[in-house]
Image (cartoon, grey):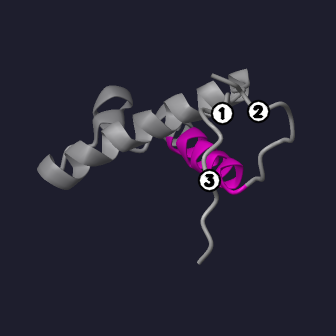
Amino acid sequence: MATTPSLGTAQVHRTPLDWIAGTLVIIGALNWGPIGLLQLDVVAAIFGSGTVPTRIVYVLVGIAGIYCLVRAFMPPKSGPVASR
């Protein structure tokens, strides 16, 4: 498999949507840790099990995860390479 030499640190432009999606994915990850370790659903503990706000949080986290997955496989936009 051929390797590509590094040209330095690339600057990544993140949109507000990228930041929101990233935050929601982190919230989802922080919810799944206690579920796996302690069988404690933090989101359900805060908003109540099966309530509308809980379901909204779960849906938003799921959409954010799909968004981040798609963004991870998108080719980078062509532009100037950051120089040192």
Q: Residue at x 62, y 72 (%)?
A: 2
Q: Report the Cα–Cα distance between label 3 and label 1.
A: 13 Å
The numbered dot on residue 76 is none
Tell me, yes or no, whether the two marked residues, 3 and 2, touch with CB atoms within 8 Å.
no
Q: Amino acid at mark 1?
A: Ala
The picture places residue 7, in percent across and down from the top left corner, at 65, 41
Query: Of label 3 and label 2, which has the lower sequence position?
Result: 3
The picture places residue 48, in percent across and down from the top left corner, at 35, 34
The mark lying in front, picked from 3 and 2, is 3
**The N terminus - image quarter:** bottom right
Q: Amino acid at mark 2?
A: Val
Judge left or right: residue 43 versus residue 58. left
> Picture quarter containing residue 43?
top left
Residue position for label 1: 10
> Magenta residues, as a range?
58-73
Q: Residue at x 60, y 65 (%)?
A: 3
**Which residue is at the far left?**
38
What kind of element bears circle 3? loop
- Local packing at callout 3 (Cα closer than 10 Å; few below 14, some 14-19, many 20+) is few
- Local packing at callout 2 (Cα closer than 10 Å; few below 14, some 14-19, many 20+) is few
Q: Report the Cα–Cα distance between label 1 and label 2.
A: 6 Å
- Local packing at callout 1 (Cα closer than 10 Å; few below 14, some 14-19, many 20+) is few
Query: Of label 3 and label 1, which has the lower sequence position?
Result: 3
Q: Residue at x 51, y 29 (%)?
A: 23
Query: Of label 1 and label 2, which has the lower sequence position?
Result: 1
**Which residue is at the far bottom?**
1
The numbered dot on residue 81 is 2
Residue position for label 3: 5
What kind of element bears circle 2? loop
Q: Amino acid at mark 3?
A: Pro
